[in-house]
Image (cartoon, coloured by chain):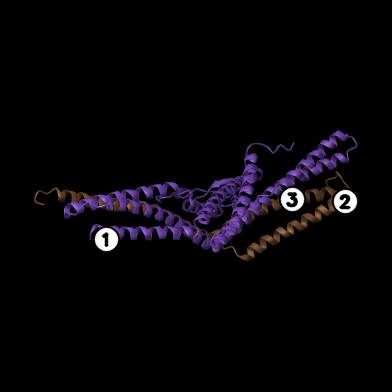
Amino acid sequence: MAITTNSLAAWTETNETLTQDLQSVLTFLATAPWSADPASPYALAEAEQTRLTAAIHQHAVTGLQQINEEIADGPLIAEINALSARAKQEATLIANAVKTVTGITRAVDLATGVVSQFNKLPFL
Amino acid sequence: MDGRSGGYSLHRAARTAIAAAILIGLSGCATSTAFRNSVGQFGTLTKAGTNAQNARLAAIVADDQERIRAALAAGHVDLRLDPTCAATLTSQETVAPPCRLVRADGQALEQPVEIDNILALSAALGTYADGLIALAADSTDDQAAFTSSINSLGTSLGKLEGEVRTATGGAPGSSRTEIGAVAAVVAEAGNLYFGYRRSRALQQIVLTGDPIVQEAVATLVRVQLRIRQYDRSTLFAQVQAAQQRASQLAHDPGAGAADLRTAQNALFTALAAYNAAGGDVAKYVAIGEAHGALAEAARAGASPGQMAAAITAIMHLAGTIHDSVETLEGDGGGDSGSN
């Protein structure tokens, strides 16, 4: 599913609505007369704040899911991987310089051996 | 070519090599070393940060799965095998498809939150950090190997030159010594060049990568904000429960002051835990700032001022990551100790 700015905006809007609803309930609870009666406005408001907090908790998970889908639809991972490949390639290139010099040395040693054998030939 | 012209040629090569070494050395070797060190530290700290976030995400997925399973059991939901499970049993595909469950009432079975792409992004940033670490790594061993291989080449060239002289009947000369001297300078110049090349490559990669890293970091900051909302809402529910208990006791004529004091202390503790949670977002902001400082240093040719700014940003990053790792280890070590 493609995630667009609209769905991000929708997530933010829902988050704000939940926040405002919770704030309204907390405003009421801050000064409302305490009551143990489950049917009282106080107890109903307590139940509502619990429900809203759980909704905010679950909405965070929805937000994570949304970001997960957004990443899948974007080029970000491929772009970072390309950078990593470049960094590693450069590091390997430098490390290989030693191997190149060692290879040249081997070639020179080989040539020295040939010339040395050449010098040992009796007709020279 | 006689021995004298060969010697002249070698001296000229030596001078060129020395000039190249000085030129490269003057082009900012000291700041390049500092730049490489800062980049390496950035890489290490970024990996630590993303690892901490991944651990938290994995815990959230486990929580979410637990919530779903608890709801299924609480609702007496009847779970059945998806008919496609038959095909999974006899599948000839390389990767066998999974068998899934379905609800007997036909409703969709809720799945836990998926975070695979967030983890992939985090891993990509970690791999990028690895690449920077590899490129910025302490090159002492490489330098020693290169110097040794150049010296071996010098020795081999000296031997070859001696054999050629023997073959052509030339008089013994001092070329072997000169070749050795040039080899030493070439080794030094080569190592300086590699150091310069490392720094140059790092600077280019950091500059090219900065907008991408900033976007990745912005995404991970949003992830962290969701994690913070998730964690803080759990703590807020504990504050609410503690507040409700304290209010109840405050209106209970039978409750003593000591009981109320205990309940209110629990409320104060829960509130303190809630207010203390949520500093982790700063860590991800710090990753972006540290990379931005490195990019600024790279753009400015790593001047001492820019390097100081980059190092300050990385030190800030180190501090925030250290704190959050400690918090994470503390969380994993047992209960919060709030009772």
Q: Does residue B315 appear to the left or right of B274 in the view shown?
A: left
Task: Please name the residue that numbered disc 3 is placed on.
Answer: A51
The quadrant where residue B334 appears: top right
Q: Quadrant of the N terminus of chain B?
A: bottom left
Whether callout 3 and callout 2 share a subunit is answered yes
Q: Secondary structure at mark 2?
A: helix
Measured as percent of width and height from the top left, residue B24 is found at 45, 59
Chain A rendering hue: brown
Label 3 neighbour load within 10 Å: few <14, some 14-19, many 20+: some
Look at mark 1 in the image and give the residue it sits on.
B5
* Spot occupied by residue B319 in the image (x, y as percentages of width and height): 63, 48
Task: Give the distance between the C-alpha atoms of the residues marked 3 and 2, in whole angstroms.
Answer: 20 Å
The residue type indicated by label 3 comes to: Arg
Please state which amino acid type lies under the numbered disc 2.
Thr
Whole-percent x and y of residue B302?
A: 54, 59
Q: Nearer the viewer, mark 1 or mark 3?
A: 1
Q: Position of residue A60 (x, y in %)?
A: 66, 53
Mark 3 belongs to chain:
A
Which mark identifies residue A31? 2
Residue type marked 1? Ser
